[in-house]
RNA sequence: GGAAGGUUGGCAGAGCGGUAAUGCAGCACCUUGGAAAGGUGUCGUCGGCAACGGCGCGGGGGUUCGAUUCCCUCACCUUCCGCCA
């Protein structure tokens, strides 16, 4: 949520900043609605003040046994008027709130300006890409079974079998252990979240269509960012504990509405996938360093897995709704001869903290914290990358050194189709 | 599923129809060579340059001139009973 005070005081600055990411904030609408709010608020508060005074007088008269009929008539008149005005004011406040909830975060000054993903900037490339193997993961192993999953649930699900399932489990444990090593506290959290939580992190109200909704006002989480960040909703943190670093492995559920026909083959885009999420709650004055730290924590996984990847910085036009700065990590997918996103590391500045009310006290003043998060990493896509990059062309997938202790072997023999 | 009790500022904790005590912590200032102790103020949030005013006692609604206090409703917490694991 954008800072309304800032919006009132420096409208043009914010307008220009939002323009960079292609969001045209409606100035006329805001100004007219805010002016209405102000006049109504002043009116309501004056009436309330008047009523409070009369009520106080009322108490006095009652005590001394004087007649209160005249006062009662006065208050009745005020209340009649006040009721209507309060209703109007509430309507306007709701309207303003709805307006504000739809406004995305302002991009950081350092973010490259661009209109869409074609203008993202490659920051760094790591590892050697290979072009020898062209088979994709479904061709390499039949232990990733999407057809069987169709019977169980439908399209965009998968069943993993045998060593492939075990390899995924090894990846999960390895990633979690690595996060813990880097100072994150591990959490086990609910895989469903309520409306307040999803509003806090920014998925609601705008992106309800992307979520799976259960009966009973609960949604399946699209990422562990939601429960992990909301651990601190309505909490006061101690400044000396910042940054707070937490992690969790959870399945993630996404409706993928609007992605019909896109990435329909294999594990790349599923309704359900495993992910390790890294979250930091930070002091605003070093949140960008914390983002760099989190990014390096995520990259470290790929370094250890010896997978080739690149880091790109999203331009203003491609930034997510709540983010003020985002780096994507993309891993090399030999079968597609493309880099594909495997992690997205973002600084949300105080945007989520404002919605979720995550504060700390500094020099006696209440301040909103900054929130940072990123995948460390998306397990399903990592599994594909590992299979495709490490396949020897015949029947063996090489297991990188860092995974041996988790997988229990230095190679995985596949049964070909 | 049944029953009872509870939810007050960062924390603790009173008030139970007349408009939020008090303590601890934090912050600012005074005092000091410096600190501690002590003193004064500030110490939820919104509007306002300010003076000041409004709102706020889990959420929503009602009764009342006036609600933290009474009533209804929802959520959550605690305890007990039942059922299940």
Image: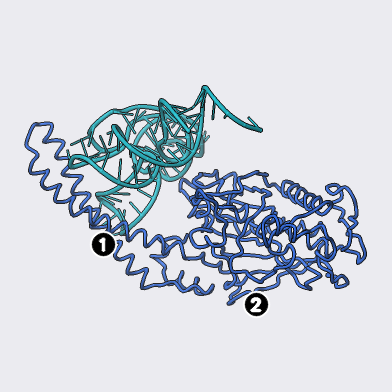
Chain colours: A blue, B cyan
* Residue under numbered circle 1: A39
Looking at the image, which residue is at 75% across and 57% down? Answer: A148
Q: Quick check: B14 above or below A376? A: above
Mark count: 2
Chain holding disc 1: A
Q: Quick check: B43 above or below A145? A: above
Label 1: which secondary element: helix
* Residue under numbered circle 2: A118
Q: Which of marks 1 and 2 is nearer the N terminus?
A: 1
Q: In which quarter of the view is residue A306 placed? A: bottom right
Label 2: which secondary element: helix
- Quadrant of image for the C terminus of chain A: bottom right
Locate residue A262, reporting x and y percent: 67, 71
Asked if residue A88 lies left or right of residue A220, the reply is left
Count neighbours of disc 2 (C-alpha within 10 A) and say few if under 14, some if 14 to 19, many if 20 or more.
few
Locate residue A70, reporting x and y percent: 7, 44
Looking at the image, which residue is at 43% across and 63% down? Answer: A100
């Amino acid at each position: 949520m954008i800072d309304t005070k800032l919006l009132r005081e420096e409208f043009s600055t914010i307008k220009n900043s939002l323009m960079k990411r292609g969001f045209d904030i409606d100035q006329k609408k805001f100004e007219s609605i805010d002016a209405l709010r102000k006049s109504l608020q002043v009116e309501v508060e004056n009436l309330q003040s008047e009523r409070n005074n009369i009520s106080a007088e009322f108490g006095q008269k009652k005590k001394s046994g004087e007649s209160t009929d005249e006062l009662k008539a006065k208050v009745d008149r005020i209340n009649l008027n006040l009721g209507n005005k309060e209703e109007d004011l509430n309507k306007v406040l709701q309207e303003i709130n709805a307006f504000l909830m739809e406004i995305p975060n302002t991009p950081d000054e350092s973010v490259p300006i661009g209109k869409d993903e074609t203008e993202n900037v490659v920051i760094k490339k790591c590892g050697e890409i290979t072009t020898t193997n062209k088979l994709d993961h479904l061709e390499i192993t039949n232990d990733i079974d999407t057809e069987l999953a169709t019977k169980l649930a439908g399209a965009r699900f998968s069943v993993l079998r045998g060593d492939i399932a075990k390899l995924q489990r090894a990846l999960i444990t390895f990633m979690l252990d690595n996060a813990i090593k880097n100072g994150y506290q591990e959490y086990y959290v609910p895989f469903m979240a309520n409306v307040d939580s999803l509003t806090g992190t920014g998925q609601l109200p705008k992106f309800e269509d992307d979520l799976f909704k259960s009966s009973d006002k609960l949604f399946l989480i699209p990422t562990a960012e939601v429960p992990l960040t909301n651990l601190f909703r309505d909490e006061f943190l101690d400044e000396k504990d910042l940054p707070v670093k937490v992690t969790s492995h959870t399945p993630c559920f996404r409706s993928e509405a609007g992605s019909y026909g896109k990435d329909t083959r294999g594990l790349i885009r599923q309704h359900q996938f495993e992910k390790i999420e890294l979250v930091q709650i930070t002091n605003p004055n070093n949140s960008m360093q914390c983002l760099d730290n989190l990014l390096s924590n995520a990259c470290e996984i790929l370094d250890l897995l010896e997978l080739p990847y690149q880091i790109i910085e999203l331009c203003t036009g491609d930034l997510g709704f709540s983010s003020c700065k985002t780096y994507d990590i993309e891993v090399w997918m030999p079968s597609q001869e493309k880099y594909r996103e495997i992690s997205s590391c973002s600084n949300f500045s105080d945007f989520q903290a404002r919605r979720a009310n995550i504060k700390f006290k500094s020099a006696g003043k209440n301040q909103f914290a900054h929130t940072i998060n990123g995948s460390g990493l998306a397990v399903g896509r990592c599994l594909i990358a590992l299979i495709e990059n490490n396949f020897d062309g015949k029947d063996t997938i090489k297991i990188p050194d860092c995974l041996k202790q988790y997988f229990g072997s230095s190679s995985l023999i596949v049964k070909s189709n």
